[in-house]
Each structure stands twice: as C-alpha cells, then as structure tokens.
Image (tube, grey):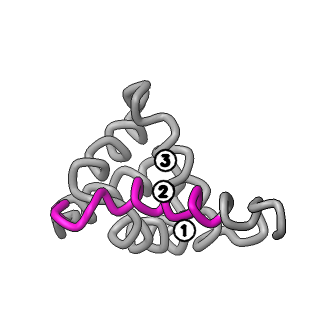
Amino acid sequence: MRNGAGKKTFVVALAALGLMVGGAQAAAPSATQKAEFYKTCMGIAQDDALCGCKADAAMTLVDADFMDVIISSMKGKAPPTSDNQKYGIYIGQSNKICKPNY
C-alpha cells in the first residue's frame, strides 16, 4: 500500500456505499415498497427464498427513491442512465447477500 492503491480502493468503496444509502437524510423504503418488490420478483422468478432475501436486502441497501427504480426495472423499464452505476452496485451487493455462489 505504499503507492496509495489501498487507500484509493477504500475511498472508492466508501463512495459506492454512499451511493447505496443515498445519504443520511434519504427515506428508507416502505413496507409497501417491500411488498411490491416481493410480488414483482415472484412474478419473475417464482422463488420464495430468493425473492424474500432480495426484498430484505433491498431494504438495507437502497433508499425509497431507488427502490422505485429497482421495481420499475423488474417490470421492464430501464433504469435512468444516471443510475446505471448505482443499479449495478445494488445488483452486485444483493447477489452477494442472496446468491453468494452466483
């Protein structure tokens, strides 16, 4: 880490985390959003364990506004281009939690 690479990686990881939680003032997803996420996921995957895990994970990984983006995406709408990186981070983190060998 003499060249600062470890420090840079740490800063990038912190920035990614900030993208996920949306800042201290962001509203948490609602129970209604969680239920919609689960219902939409079940319509796609028909996998209770996976959809339950992904719904629980989303509650801790994203804010209410981004939960709407995720649900819309599951229904076939592409995330806004400005959210592509954030969406990719969410997918990676939720897969790490719910599909660790994926």
Disc 2 marks a residue whose amino acid type is Ala
Q: Residues within 10 Å of mark 2 (few under 14, many from 20)?
A: few
* Residue at (22% x, 56% y) in the render: 64
Disc 3 marks a residue whose amino acid type is Ile
Q: Which residues are magenta?
A: 10-27
Any mark on residue 50, and which? 1
Image spot of residue 70 (x, y percent): 37, 46
Disc 1 marks a residue whose amino acid type is Leu
Residue 32 lies in the magenta-colored region: no
Q: CA distance from mark 1 to mark 2?
A: 28 Å
Write down the residue under mark 2: 15
* Residue at (48% x, 44% y) in the render: 87
Dot placed on the residue nearer the N-terminal end, 3 or 1: 3
- Nearer the observer, 1 or 53: 1
Q: Quadrant of the N terminus?
A: bottom right
Any mark on residue 73, and which? none
Secondary structure, mark 2, is helix
Residue 22, can we see it?
yes
Magenta span: chief secondary structure: helix
Write down the residue under mark 3: 44
